[in-house]
Image (cartoon, grey):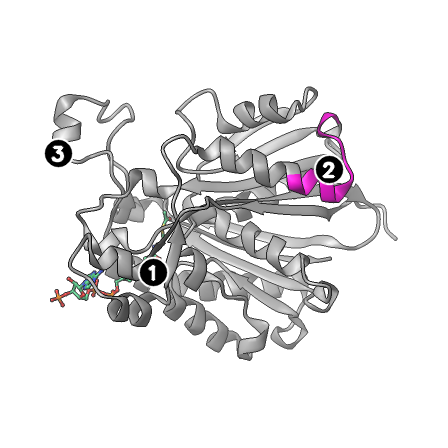
Amino acid sequence: MSDMNYAEIVGTGHSVPERILTNFDLEKIVDTSDEWIVTRTGIRERHIADKDTTASTLGTEAATQALEKAGMGAEDLDLILVATVTPDMPFPSTAAIIQKKINASKSAVMDISAGCTGFIYGLSIADSYIKTGIFKNILVIGVEVLTKITDWTDRSTCVLFGDGAGAVVLRATKERKGVLGTYIKGDGRLGELLMMPGGGSRNPASEETVAHRLHYLKMSGNEVFRFAVQAMGDASRAILETTGLKPEDIGMLVPHQANLRIINATAKRLGLPPEKVYINIDRYGNTSSASIPIALDEIRSNGNYKKASPLLLVAFGAGFTWGSAAISW
Ligand code: ACO
């Protein structure tokens, strides 16, 4: 027991669209192969949202599950944070839209744009509000419908992404558990390596922006890859230093699921055996800010989940951003 507040994880949830697109389906759309995708990325299939499914649809489903498992009513929430780069619309925020859907009448609402690191940013912000005693109950959602901004004629990106949402409910406690530490960084000089150039105030939507395909995600995959390996290493090292944990203390590494080769390089640097590295990229592809909270809900749904503690979460993404967190159940 101490005077400080900790942010305990009291509930998790996740949701993915029903429709599955396999690598074999993609072979029929672009010049690619299951073999290329599996060996270069580790992805075998991904879930794709239909026309009527939006960030708030998936986010609401994940949030409802997380609240239920936490045994908490939406009216008890002080803050809803939604990490996404594919919001329902630029404004109002997707957090506000989800607030209305779950009827969380008393909460503040905020979206976070930090690419695939968004969930870690959300956890870090939530942890700070709880530590300082400003808020007690916070819902953090990572949700992405990247397939809505995917250019299905660009084989170098369209094979990578999938849709989904994950959510966690955090509650203030005096016990040392939950979020043990977080680390977040950014480097805007690298922003143009990964962006959606259209639709904002620089290139407002017009016939021209549509004709130039500016409303799709653009990525220099190779450069992002090289940066990612460095960033994941830096973030892992930093959080171990801040929390005093050693690699051998880690119960489970939960890395952002962008590419199996990046995940393996990160695990190797930390000297972690395969059974301590959570991988679901084969089933979901890269779901950006949703990948870590989806993994957390899958881990927690397992009867043995307490063995996988403490967990080291680590991610990188558009911005550029990168970050990490250590949590215990
Ligand atoms: N099928 C077949 N061939 C392909 C495909 C495909 N889908 N895509 C590219 N190729 C070809 C290329 O044209 C190239 O051919 P060439 O040598 O004849 O020119 C060859 O494969 C190699 O291409 P590279 O881009 O060098 O392949 P690489 O091994 O780097 O893998 C990949 C590409 C998977 C995109 C990798 O660079 C990567 O994972 N990068 C990181 C992406 C990432 O993690 N982004 C995360 C952030 S996402 C967010 O924040 C929203």
Residue 105, percent from left and from top: 68, 19
Q: Which residue is mark 1?
A: 227
Q: Is residue 272 visible?
A: no
For residue 301, above or below residue 146: below
| Disc 1 versus disc 2: nearer the observer | 1
Amino acid carrying mark 2 in the image: Thr
Mark 1 vs 3: CB contact within 8 A: no
- State the residue in front, 57 or 90: 57
For residue 207, above or below residue 140: above
Give the mark nearer the N terminus: 3 vs 2.
Answer: 2
Find out whether residue 68 is within the magenta segment: yes
Q: Which residue is mark 2?
A: 132
Find out whether residue 136 is within the magenta segment: no
Q: Is residue 266 left or right of residue 124?
A: left
Give the mark nearer the N terminus: 1 vs 3.
Answer: 3
Residue 274, percent from left and from top: 53, 77
For residue 154, above or below residue 309: above
Q: Quadrant of residue 35?
A: bottom left
Question: What range of the chain is rendered magenta?
Answer: 65-75
